[in-house]
Image: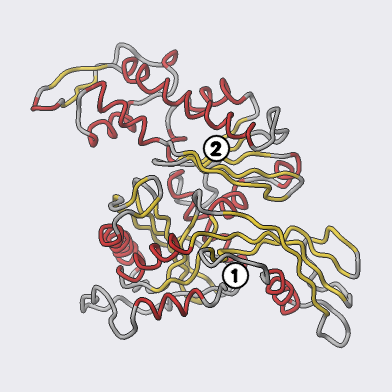
Amino acid sequence: MSNGYLATLDIGSSQVRVCVAELTKNGTFPIVGVGTAMSSGIKKGAIIDIEQAAGAIRSAIEQAEQMVGIEITNVYVGLSGNHISIQHSHGVVATLNQDREIGAEDVERVLQASKVIALPPERVIIEVVSKQFIVDGIPEIRDPIGMVGVRLEVEAMIITGSKTVVHNVYRCIEKASLHMAGFVFLPLSISEFTLTADEKTLGVVLADIGSGTIKLAFYAQGNLAGTAVIPMGGEYITTDLVYVLQTQKEVAEELKCKHGIAVKAHADKRESIPIQMMAGKERYSSQLELAQIMEPRIMEIFQLINQQVKAMGFSHEPAGGYVLVGGVTETPYLLDAAKSQLGQGVRIARSKETGISSPAFLASVSMIHHLAKQGSVLINKPARIETVPRKKEKKQVSAFQRMKSWLSEFI
């Protein structure tokens, strides 16, 4: 039996991805549907055309709906980028129960108390993350529920984002005839899904290498210590192939995915690869030639990661190493290239979800796991898809009023 369906949306520079999980009576949440669409109106992770982006979102949603057989109305959206900032905060409340046993409502109240901070008008709270709870002066408590105490405190991280960026994402969701259920801070959900407790304690860097950007998350002493975004990604490799081989972007992307290799020392120079050039011309290339084009850019990506990590305060290789995620990690011998620039402590994380092996879906799946563990989420009821086409946009309530109502929950 199903309690409903949970849907997440990952708006990337190259693709928009939807992931749908069924929340079952026994507490499991298997992935039952996915949808993808080529991104449009999105550049380097930022929305530059709301109408085009909404169309891409709608296409991905409809694909997932057909797979699952239900109408999706509520979606949680992954968020990251240079506009994100982290503030540290403290909250304190008195426990409510007469027997002084701490319950879920006490935890919720203390987290709400930590959100009472001075916030500029152009910022909005995205998520609150607890670093530690303190019960009657006893620190370093991860989960206080069930403990007995009079005073409950929390040391928290308040993740805030640009209200303009939030508004643009919200408008895209509305234009796609969907309801914004909430945001998920992607570096956090991906870290929870891929990093081990030991890695976080020792100090680790998570690098999400996407199409248009590289998103970094730094962990130290078990907690998220900072994030950064590098404006480079797999799309730059594609662009290099376009210019050197004088071919179209679609052809270059296919060459990269089917025949590309990260290190030319492992390339097969005997392989003959036909390439459709501009103006209808055709030529033949080899895997070695592709590697000679791709390797310098891949090495540059890891050099930039190394520079950014040092700028964030890691003077040496993090004790917990580096963990790589993202679609670019499918490139053969990418791990060799990474180790040559970052050291030997590098691994590539794969999705642990049965049936979804593509690294490109790892972010969407991580959001499902992050939300399902919270317990209280806005779900899609298991109603069948209507045969009547949807309206493009609901007109009953103005966009401003709906945006104002949604933002009021976070302010």
Q: Secondary structure at mark 1?
A: loop
Q: Which residue is mark 1?
A: 27
Q: Is residue 167 above or below residue 37?
A: below
Which residue is pictured at 40% across the width and 63% down the height?
Answer: 169
The dot on residue 324 is: 2
Q: CA distance from mark 1 to mark 2?
A: 30 Å
Q: Nearer the viewer, mark 1 or mark 2?
A: 2
* Three-letter amino acid code of the residue under disc 1: Gly
> How far from the left and from the top, in percent, is residue 5?
46, 71
- Which quarter of the figure has residue 248? top left
Do the residues bearing badges 1 and 2 touch, measured as CB atoms within 8 Å? Answer: no
| Few, some or many residues within 10 Å of mark 1 (<14, 14–19, 20+) | few
Q: Is residue 125 above or below residue 194?
A: below
Taking depth in this image into account, of 12 and 373 the one nearest to the observer is: 12
* Three-letter amino acid code of the residue under disc 2: Leu
Q: Is residue 342 above or below residue 269?
A: below
Q: Residue furthest bottom?
A: 98
